[in-house]
Structure formats: structure tokens, C-alpha cells
């Protein structure tokens, strides 16, 4: 960490354990002082009208929630999805996180498929920017150098990590869910889980229509922050990996009116000038971020400056990030207009309507994906998907069903960026493709549990894996899974 007037800046370097290089900063100054509240007030008990009785209710319509609702509804289950905002996609749309991280392994095998593949295949071609399938896995220097600047090559290998048009994503997610028969409820904030006979049996939500309840056999918590499992008394973890970016926050923004190809020519072709430029940016702005490509040449996305030392469970901290991020957007736009080739006519196009939260709580599940297991390459007995690893040093990571199942709580599954894993592993398991993967698995399992009248932890792994395969999920061959390792043991 280096100190400067505005706070501390730490440089996170790309290593074999972390794929993203970035500055992370911690500011001293705050825009607002503390609120003056003291004491507590009592809330009266009241009756709450029941809005709907579903088989599965999915709370949160981000990548994980969309995949969960779609998967469960494919089986014919009655599925409701509650979303607090006016669109689907969560951070991938409202958060302007339009760079979809790698779905291929280091050989170019397409390992995250299922909902992820169907979704991207159905995007209009003009809304997707990324390498053609024929180039996935290429180690060709020129191709890798080209795609490295365009979000889709790491460690000298071309991968499938495209950028997508967020408005097309919102629309497509909505249409896919409606086609599958999901009842979407926008503008509905899930306030708390509904406990029935000691287990989660639905949710209470707030909307302009007041407080209402949804009853369901299984609740899938895809809020990203464990809103449901934490309030239901489920155990969770919240430690962070200081040396990574996974705990930082910011509101992303789009800058329009640019010539991205000219910027990339400068960035990739003039290393000395580029280093001088970033030094000047750090000096003038204190906290500095460079843009990533998007689905259009005239728009760049800034997914920083990344801010640490703040909690996305604290409303004052969240407000602070928004205030700073709006200021950063204006300062970056002005600085880039003055100093960056291709940005002469740049303008502030849009700041994300959704705060960029990377980490808050992580479920304490019956299984936990851990850093120590990255290297073993053995599929787990309850595998529900495969994640690419962070570097070619490691094989793919087998994702266990147990990472979605709470240790004690029944009636609930968790998917997305708050699954059960250690802080190090969270660095990549929180990415959008992995959230699609775990969301789909949770949705499929919830539908099986609801259909059979059993708890999610009792779902038969073979039945679940067969259902996921029928929905296009890529899994290790059953013969590769150690027969001596029963599912119940893997899920401890
Ligand atoms: C700035 C930033 C940059 C990132 N960069 C990348 C990247 O380049 N590539 C990549 O793949 N990933 C990236 N990520 C990570 C990725 O975007 C997220 O981890 C992923 O979107 C998480 O998906 P999710 O479905 O678990 O949660 P979210 O996307 O957070 O979605 C949760 C949804 O639930 C809704 N919700 C929450 N609480 C409630 C409630 N109580 N009631 C009703 N609705 C609720 C929210 O409104 C939201 O729609 C980045 C993240 C950030 C913040």
C-alpha cells in the first residue's frame, strides 16, 4: 500500500492465483457524517396478505437468479422470481458489469454451458463482442495480444470471455424467463424469509402495494448478499482476501463518444507513453482507472476505481461509494478528454443504476470450495458444474452441490456470489458465468425437492446431474467421479 493525501492505494498484480491486476484504494475522507439516531422502536405485529403460493421462489434476478428460475421452470414447476429493481440481470446489466468472465478452460473447452450458453447463443450478434469459437484456446501470440486488450485472453491464451450489450441482456433474460413460465415480480424487495415449522417456507416482500407474503416449498436465495439465509439464521462467513479485489466496491460507468480502437492502439502500441499517462492519472485523480472495451467501439466501461474498507451491508458506506463514484466518473471523463487518444469527444453516458458489490456474506454450506483443492483436479461426488481455474497452473474446479446447501437450514438453497467457498476462491466463483452455473444447479435442485416433497439436502445427486445434463450443463463424466466417495461424505 502506498499513502497519498486522499488515502491508501494498493496495487493488485496478476499472478497465478489472481487473474486481475488493479489498484484498490481506501479513502480517508467521507462525504457525510454519521446519522444521529439512538435507541430502538417496536414494530407492531400484523397480518400479511398472501400474494402467491409457488413451488419455488427465487429471490433476486441477477445472473444466478435468472438461471435458477429458468432451470426450475423448465421442469414445469410453479416459479416466482422477486426482484427489487425494474430489470433482470443484476450486476451484469444494472451494474454495467458487461464483461462476462471466462467460460472456457485453458485448452479452449467450453466448460460453463447450460443456461450460460443458451443465453449468449440467443443474444443478437451485434450485442456480443468476443473471439470466434475457432480461436478459443489458441496460444498464438498475435491473437492473444489482440484479445488480451479486448477482455478475452489471459496468460497468452485466447478464451471465451465476451462483452455484451446490457439492454439486450435485460430483454433476453426477461423473455427467456417468461417463455419458461416464470412469474416475474419487479419492484418487490424481499424483506425477510418466512419461517414455517422450523424451515424456510417462503418470503415476505415490500412493494408500493405494502407488505405481502409468498409461500413456497423451496426458496432460492440469489440476492448476492445472503439476505434470506442470514435472516433465517443460516451460518455464513464474511472474511476477505486482502490481496485481491474481491472485497472492493464501486459503481461502474459508461463513457460514450469515444474511439476505442484508437485508445487500444495507444494502450497496446505505446507502452512508455501509456505508463506516463497512467502516472499522470494517478497523480491528478489520486484513484485512477482505465477503461475496458464493450460491445461497441464508441463506448468504454470503467469498472473502478475499486474502493475497499467499506461494507455493502452498511447503508452509509453504500451511499459513500455512490457519492464518490459519481465524482470519479466526472473526473475520469474530463481527464480522459484532455489526455487520452480516442477520448477527445467523450461524454458521460451512464452510471450504473446498481451499486457494484463484489462481496458481503458467503454461505456456510455442507461443502466449501477451498483454495487448497484447486490443484487436485478430481471431480467431487456431488458435482453440479465445472469452473475454469484462475491460471493454467490449475486444472478446472469441480463445483459441489453442497456449496449451495446450508449446513442446518432447510427449505432454502443459495446460489451466485454468496455460495460456500473460502475468500480466495470467492475471487473467481463470484464471476457471472459461475453465478449462472450455480444458479442453474440451485433451480434444478429446488424443482426436484419441491416435486418430490423432500428437503433440498435430500435431493438425489444422480437425478440432479441428469436433469442438469438435459439442460445443457457440462459435467465431468460419471466414470471419472471416485466411486468410493459417497455424496453424503463429499457434502460434509
Ligand atoms: C464492479 C464489478 C466488476 C466486476 N467485474 C466482473 C467481470 O468483469 N466479469 C465477471 O464475470 N464478473 C464480474 N463481477 C462479478 C459479477 O458481476 C457478480 O459477482 C455477479 O453478477 C453476481 O451475480 P449474482 O446473481 O450472484 O448477484 P447480483 O448480480 O448482485 O444480483 C443479485 C440480484 O438480486 C437483487 N436483490 C438483492 N437483494 C434483494 C432483495 N432483498 N429483494 C429483491 N431483490 C434483491 C438485486 O437487485 C440483483 O438484481 C464484477 C462485479 C463488480 C461489482
Image (cartoon, helix red, strand yellow):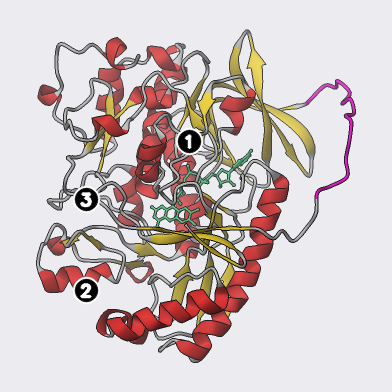
Report the mark closest to the observer, 2 or 3. Answer: 2
Mark before the other along the chain sequence, 1 or 2: 2
Horizontal arrangement in the rendering, residue 216 relative to residue 462 (left or right)? right
x, y (%) of residue 251? 57, 60
> Which residue is labeled 3 in the image?
104
Q: Would you name the residue on which mark 1 appears?
A: 418
Return the residue found at the far front.
3
The one of 194 and 343 positioned closer to us in this rendering: 343
Q: Which mark is residue 457?
A: none
Residue closest to the eye, 306 or 419: 306
Number of other residues with Cα within 10 Å of mark 3, as a class: few under 14, some 14 to 19, many 20 or more = many
Mark 1 and ligand 1: say if the CB distance to the nearest ligand atom is below 8 Å: yes
Q: Helix, strand or loop at disc 2?
A: helix
- Please say whether residue 45 is one of the residues in the magenta stretch: yes
Q: Nearer the viewer, residue 421 or 443?
A: 421
Quarter of the figure that contains the C terminus:
top left
Query: Going by the image, does 175 lie left or right of 216?
Result: left
Q: Nearer the viewer, residue 81 or 245?
A: 245
Residue under pointer 2: 146
Relative to 290, residue 404 above or below: above
The part of the chain drawn in magenta is 34-48
Q: Position of residue 17 (x, y in %)?
A: 28, 46
Horizontal side of 206 relative to 378 (left or right) equals right
x, y (%) of residue 309? 58, 49
Mark 2 CB within 8 Å of ligand 1: no
At horizontal 51% and vertical 80% (from top left) the residue drawn is: 256
Q: Residue at x 60, y 33 (%)?
A: 227
Lower position in the chain sequence, tag 2 or tag 3: 3
- Residue 273 visible: yes
Which of the 4 image quadrants contains residue 434? Answer: top left
* Distance from Cα at disc 1 to Cα at disc 3: 22 Å
- Are discs 2 and 3 less than 8 Å apart at CB? no
Amino acid at each position: 500500500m502506498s499513502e497519498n493525501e486522499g488515502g491508501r492505494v494498493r496495487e493488485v498484480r496478476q499472478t497465478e492465483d489472481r487473474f486481475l491486476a488493479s489498484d484498490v484504494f481506501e479513502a480517508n475522507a467521507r462525504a457525510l457524517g454519521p446519522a444521529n439516531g439512538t435507541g430502538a422502536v417496536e414494530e407492531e405485529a400484523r397480518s400479511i396478505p398472501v400474494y402467491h403460493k409457488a413451488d419455488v421462489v427465487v429471490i433476486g434476478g441477477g445472473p444466478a437468479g435468472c438461471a435458477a428460475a429458468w432451470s426450475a421452470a423448465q421442469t414445469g414447476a410453479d416459479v416466482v422470481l422477486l426482484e427489487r429493481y425494474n430489470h433482470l440481470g443484476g450486476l451484469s446489466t444494472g451494474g454495467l458489469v458487461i464483461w462476462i468472465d471466462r467460460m472456457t478452460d485453458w485448452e479452449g473447452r467450453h466448460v460453463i454451458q447450460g443456461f450460460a450458453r443458451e443465453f449468449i447463443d440467443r443474444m443478437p450478434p451485434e450485442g456480443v463482442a468476443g473471439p470466434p469459437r475457432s480461436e478459443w484456446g489458441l496460444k498464438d501470440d498475435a491473437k492473444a495480444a489482440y484479445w488480451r486488450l479486448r477482455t478475452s485472453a489471459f496468460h497468452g491464451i485466447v478464451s471465451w470471455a465476451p462483452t455484451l450489450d446490457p439492454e439486450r441482456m435485460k430483454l433476453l433474460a426477461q423473455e427467456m424467463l417468461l417463455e419458461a413460465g416464470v412469474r416475474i415480480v419487479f419492484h418487490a424487495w424481499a424483506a425477510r424469509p418466512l419461517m414455517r415449522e422450523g424451515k424456510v417456507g417462503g418470503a415476505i416482500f415490500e412493494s408500493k402495494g405494502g407488505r405481502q407474503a409468498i409461500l413456497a416449498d423451496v426458496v432460492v436465495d440469489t440476492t448476492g448478499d445472503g439476505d434470506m439465509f442470514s435472516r433465517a439464521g443460516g451460518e455464513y462467513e464474511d472474511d476477505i482476501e486482502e490481496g485481491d479485489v474481491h472485497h472492493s466496491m464501486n459503481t461502474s460507468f459508461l463513457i460514450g463518444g469515444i474511439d476505442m480502437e484508437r485508445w487500444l492502439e495507444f494502450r497496446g502500441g505505446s507502452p512508455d507513453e501509456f505508463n506516463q499517462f497512467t502516472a499522470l492519472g494517478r497523480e491528478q485523480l489520486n484513484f485512477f482507472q482505465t477503461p475496458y472495451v464493450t460491445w461497441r467501439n464508441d463506448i468504454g466501461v470503467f469498472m473502478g476505481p475499486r474502493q475497499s474498507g467499506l461494507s455493502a451491508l452498511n447503508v452509509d458506506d453504500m451511499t459513500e461509494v455512490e457519492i464518490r463514484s459519481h465524482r470519479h466518473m466526472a473526473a475520469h471523463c474530463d481527464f480522459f478528454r484532455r489526455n487520452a487518444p480516442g477520448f477527445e469527444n467523450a461524454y458521460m453516458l451512464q452510471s450504473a443504476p446498481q451499486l457494484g458489490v463484489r462481496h458481503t456474506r458467503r454461505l456456510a454450506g455442507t461443502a466449501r470450495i477451498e483454495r487448497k483443492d484447486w490443484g487436485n483436479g478430481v471431480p467431487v461426488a456431488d458435482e453440479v458444474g465445472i469452473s475454469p481455474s484462475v491460471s493454467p497452473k490449475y486444472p478446472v474446479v469441480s463445483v459441489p452441490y453442497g456449496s449451495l446447501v446450508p449446513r442446518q437450514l432447510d427449505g432454502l438453497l443459495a446460489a451466485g456470489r454468496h455460495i460456500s467457498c473460502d475468500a480466495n476462491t470467492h475471487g473467481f466463483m463470484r464471476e457471472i458465468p459461475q453465478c449462472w452455473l450455480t444458479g442453474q444447479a440451485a433451480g434444478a435442485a429446488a424443482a426436484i425437492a419441491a416435486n418430490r416433497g423432500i428437503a433440498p439436502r435430500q435431493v438425489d445427486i444422480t437425478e440432479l446431474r441428469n436433469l442438469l445434463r438435459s439442460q445443457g450443463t457440462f459435467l465431468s463424466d460419471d466414470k471419472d467421479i471416485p466411486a468410493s466417495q459417497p455424496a453424503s461424505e463429499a457434502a460434509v
